[in-house]
Image: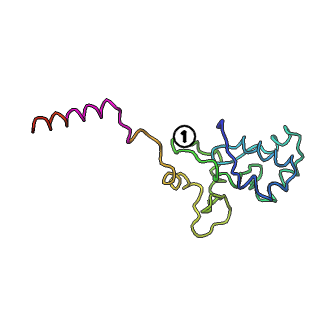
Amino acid sequence: MAERRMFHSGVVGSDAFMDLPAGVQALYFHLGMAADDDGFINSPKQIARKLRRPPRELDMLVEKGFLLDFDGVVVVRHWLLANTLRKDRMKATRYPQIAEKLYIKDNGEYTTQATAGDNLLTTRNESLVAKCPPKGREGKVRKEKINKENEKWYGMVMMLT
């Protein structure tokens, strides 16, 4: 599990989220912190018990569309709006059978129903690589190398004149 997670202000600042009781909102944030790199949580009831929240609050998050429930494993619906990782840092989810049932809308939201333009979660990495190319050292040149090249060109110009 990663150390850092982000929440999209468009989701947690929406009227639908703000209308939820404070305990349900806190549960949503704790679930987000326990999610894997794809937004899957395998122990939502355990997290709710640790916070002393009743099970109906998990059901409320599912009903309001903030979580998708797959028989004990929940998925944070708006996970990809704020949490993307480079391909080399990504750990595959332990639930590929659930990932096969999920689609990604154009706005980055998970859904279980495919529409035109949606990507399967299993092809997520390929679509995100185009948006977030890895940040390597390409294009970075050390100053010593630039100075040596400038000296070489300066020497050639001096020889020609």
Q: In this view, does 26 lie to the left or right of 111?
A: right
Identify the image quadrant of the C terminus: top left
Q: In this picture, which residue range is highlighted in magenta?
A: 139-152
Identify the image quadrant of the N terminus: top right
Q: Which residue lies furthest to the bottom in this view?
A: 116
Residue at 35 percent across and 36 percent down: it is: 141
Q: In this view, does 19 lie to the left or right of 153?
A: right
Percent position of residue 100, x then y: 62, 56
Percent position of residue 148, x then y: 25, 31
Q: In which quarter of the view is residue 30 placed? A: top right
Q: In which quarter of the view is residue 106 placed? A: bottom right
Residue at 53 percent across and 44 percent down: it is: 86
Q: Residue furthest top?
A: 144
Q: Is residue 150 magenta?
A: yes
Residue type, label 1:
Arg
Percent position of residue 91, x then y: 58, 42
Q: Is residue 144 magenta?
A: yes
Residue at 85 percent across and 39 percent down: it is: 51
Above or below: residue 80 compared with residue 30? below
Percent position of residue 99, x then y: 63, 54
Q: Which of 99 and 68 is in front in this view?
A: 68
Q: Say few, some or many: other residues with alpha carbon within 10 Å of mark 1 (under 14 / 14 to 19 / 20 or more).
A: few
Tell me the chief SS of the magenta region. Answer: helix
Residue marked by disc 1:
89
Above or below: residue 9 compared with residue 88? below
Q: In which quarter of the view is residue 90 placed? A: top right
Above or below: residue 144 compared with residue 81? above
